[in-house]
Image (tube, coloured by chain):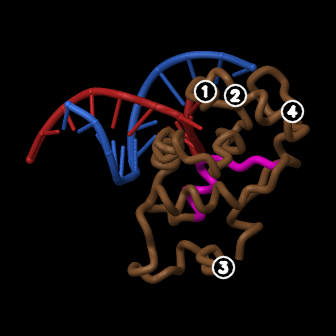
Chain colours: A brown, B red, C blue
Amino acid sequence: MLFMIPLNTRPFSMRENFFQDVYEVVRLIPEGRVSTYGAIAKYLGSAKSARMVGWAMNASHHIDDVPAHRVVNRMGILSGAAHFDPQHPMHTLLEKENIRLEGDKIANFKTLFWDPNEELL
DNA sequence: GGTTTGACGACCC
DNA sequence: AGGGTCGCCAAAC
């Protein structure tokens, strides 16, 4: 139950690499909700930038239990859509969770936003 | 081992 | 709303 201990308070010996920390947070995003690169970066400690979260997501393709489609940019825009498997587009995965879209944007982003800095201990 | 590269974000027009 | 700049930092080269 690694997730019971806030990532940013774990002793160094318990920390995996940064990518694993990112994936663990992303796995906690509830179905039908979305989070952002910046919020996750902040939760993991401001030393790590939002760009690094994007980098981690880019490397998560082969990992099946990481709901990468639930991570969008701070405007609620699906900035990573181009990197998804064409057979399972980001838009489709989100709509499957009853998330409404307006083009490349989450329709009611503010209410669907899941912030680990508030939701997690 | 210096440079380039981003699925970013804050800030400024 | 939309564009440009700058800070960010691990990987890839």
- The chain identifier of the residue carrying mark 4 reads A
Three-letter amino acid code of the residue under disc 1: Asp
**Image marks 1 and 2: residues in contact by CB distance under 8 Å:** yes
Which label lies toward us, 1 or 4? 1
Q: Quadrant of residue A95?
A: top right
Residue bounds of the magenta highlight: A33-43
The residue that mark 4 highlights is: A107
Q: Is residue A119 above or below residue A111?
A: below
Which label lies toward us, 3 or 2? 2
Q: Main secondary structure of the magenta part?
A: helix
- The chain identifier of the residue carrying mark 3 reads A
**Image marks 2 and 4: residues in contact by CB distance under 8 Å:** no
Q: Quadrant of the N terminus of chain A?
A: bottom right
Label 2: element kind: loop
- The chain identifier of the residue carrying mark 1 reads A
Instruction: Say few, some or many: other residues with alpha carbon within 10 Å of mark 1 (under 14 / 14 to 19 / 20 or more).
Output: few
Which label lies toward us, 3 or 4? 3
Q: Earlier in the sequence, mark 3 or mark 4?
A: 3
Quote the CA–CA distance across marks 3 and 2.
Answer: 31 Å
The residue that mark 3 highlights is: A4
**Image marks 3 and 4: residues in contact by CB distance under 8 Å:** no
Quote the CA–CA distance across marks 1 and 4.
Answer: 23 Å
The residue that mark 1 highlights is: A85
Q: How many marks are shown on the rendered structure?
A: 4
Instruction: Say few, some or many: other residues with alpha carbon within 10 Å of mark 4 (under 14 / 14 to 19 / 20 or more).
Output: some
Three-letter amino acid code of the residue under disc 2: His
Three-letter amino acid code of the residue under disc 4: Ala
